[in-house]
Amino acid sequence: MRILHTMLRVGDLERSVKFYTEGFGMKELRRRDVPDGKYTLAFVGYGDEDSNSVIELTYNYGVDKYEMGTAFGHLAVGVPDVAATTEKLRKAGAKVTREPGPVKFGTTIIAFVEDPDGYKIELIQRA
C-alpha cells in the first residue's frame, strides 16, 4: 500500500499548476476536464504515478476561492536548500509564513510558504 495523491481544491488551475511546476520543479503529469461534472483535474508531481505520490489540483467551474477550515495542516516537500528555495518561491510571489531556520528544539532546517490558494507547504532541508 502507498499514498496515491493528495487532492487540493484550487481557484485558478493555471496559476496553481504554474506555482507547483515552476516553483517546486514538479511536472504536470496529466489533466482531465469533465464538463458534465463541471470540474478539471491536473495531477502534478516529481515522477510517474505508478511509483510516486502526487498532488491532484481540482478546479470546480466558477469557484475561485475556498475556506481553509481547521483540519488540514500542510504538505511537506524535501528540498536540498531551504533558504534558496524559499527565496525562489518568494520572488515568484509565494507568501512566506515562516522564514528558514532550525525547527524548534532541533536542528532540521525548515520554512513554510503558502501556495496561491493559501495551502501551507513545509520545506524540509534534505541532503
Image: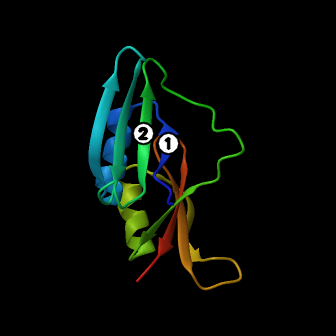
Give the residue at x 50% y 41%: 8
Give the residue at x 46% y 30%: 11
Query: Alpha-carbon distance for marks 2 and 1?
Result: 6 Å
Picture layout, residue 92 above or below residue 7: below
Q: Amino acid at mark 1?
A: Met
- The quadrant in which residue 31 appears is top left
Other residues around mark 2 within 10 Å, as few (<14) / some (14–19) / many (≥20)? many
- The quadrant in which residue 89 appears is bottom left
Left or right: 25, with 57 as reference point: left
Are the residues tagged 2 and 1 within 8 Å (C-beta)?
A: yes
Write down the residue under mark 2.
57
Write down the residue under mark 1.
7
Picture layout, residue 15 above or below residue 88: above
Residue 121 locus on image (x, y percent): 52, 57
Image quadrant in which the C terminus is located? bottom left
Picture layout, residue 90 above or below residue 115: below
Residue 77 locus on image (x, y percent): 46, 64
Q: Nearer the viewer, residue 67 or 48?
A: 48
SS at mark 1? Answer: strand
Give the residue at x 44% y 72%: 82
